[in-house]
Image: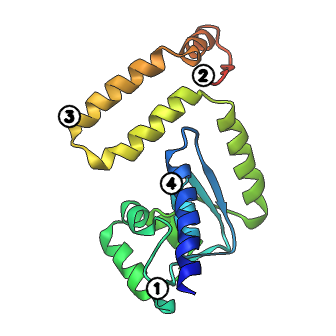
Amino acid sequence: SAAAVLDGAAVLHQAISTLYRLPKPVVCAVNGLVAGAGLGLALVADVTWAARSATFTLAYTALGLSPDGGTTFLLPRAVGPALAAELFLTNRSLDAEEAQRCGLVARVLDDEALAGEAQALARRLAQGPTRAYAELRALLRSSPLHGLETQLELERLAIGRSARSADFVEGVAALAERRAPRFRGD
């Protein structure tokens, strides 16, 4: 029913918004078919990798629906407005290689390697400098909204905040001592 679709979209949109604003990196591993709002979930991640067998489609208009899941915000930013419009209007499917070429995913891995590689990346990022990651995510999210000078000022302020963190102190100490940093996540 229309009410169920409306309620489902509200829950989905809250999840998309939460992931978009999360101060920590989000890793997405895609296998199988990614359709509709699933594409929005893949696009909201910072790093999205796909299995070679993955396929991507929007399929909204094939069902007589308009898009949801943040796809009208995220997809044009990932692939450009012309390709986004084509994908929305035609429901054309993309294989993983084409998805990588057009910017939907960063890497394509063998199906059997995808989960392990993505989990290893997530573990590595979890050990990283969380303040720097939060600042980086905010800067990347804001960059399409500003001109160069505004973005430069936002970068200046962000690096100043990062430089006040214990992670920065640890990063400098690790560099001086020629060892891997042990970030605490502040």
Q: Where does residue 146 sit, x and y in percent of width and height?
A: 25, 44
Evaluate if marks 2 and 1 touch, with contact meaning CB atoms under 8 Å apart.
Answer: no
Q: Which residue is mark 2?
A: 186
Q: Secondary structure at mark 4?
A: helix
Instruction: Tell me which amino acid carries mark 2.
Output: Asp
Give the mark nearer the N terminus: 4 vs 3: 4
Q: Which mark is residue 65?
A: 1
Q: Which mark is residue 82?
A: none
Q: Is 15 on the left-hand or right-hand side of 147?
A: right
> Residue placed farthest to the front in the image?
3
Residue 10 in sight in this render? yes
Seen from the viewer's position, the closer of residues 67 and 7 is 7
Seen from the viewer's position, the closer of residues 15 and 121 is 15
Q: Which residue is mark 3?
A: 149
Crowd rating for badge 1 (residues with CA inside 10 Å; few <14, some 14–19, many 20+):
few
Instruction: Tell me which amino acid carries mark 3.
Output: Glu
Q: Which residue is mark 4?
A: 17
Give the mark nearer the N terminus: 2 vs 1: 1
Evaluate if marks 4 and 3 touch, with contact meaning CB atoms under 8 Å apart.
Answer: no
Q: Nearer the viewer, mark 3 or mark 2?
A: 2
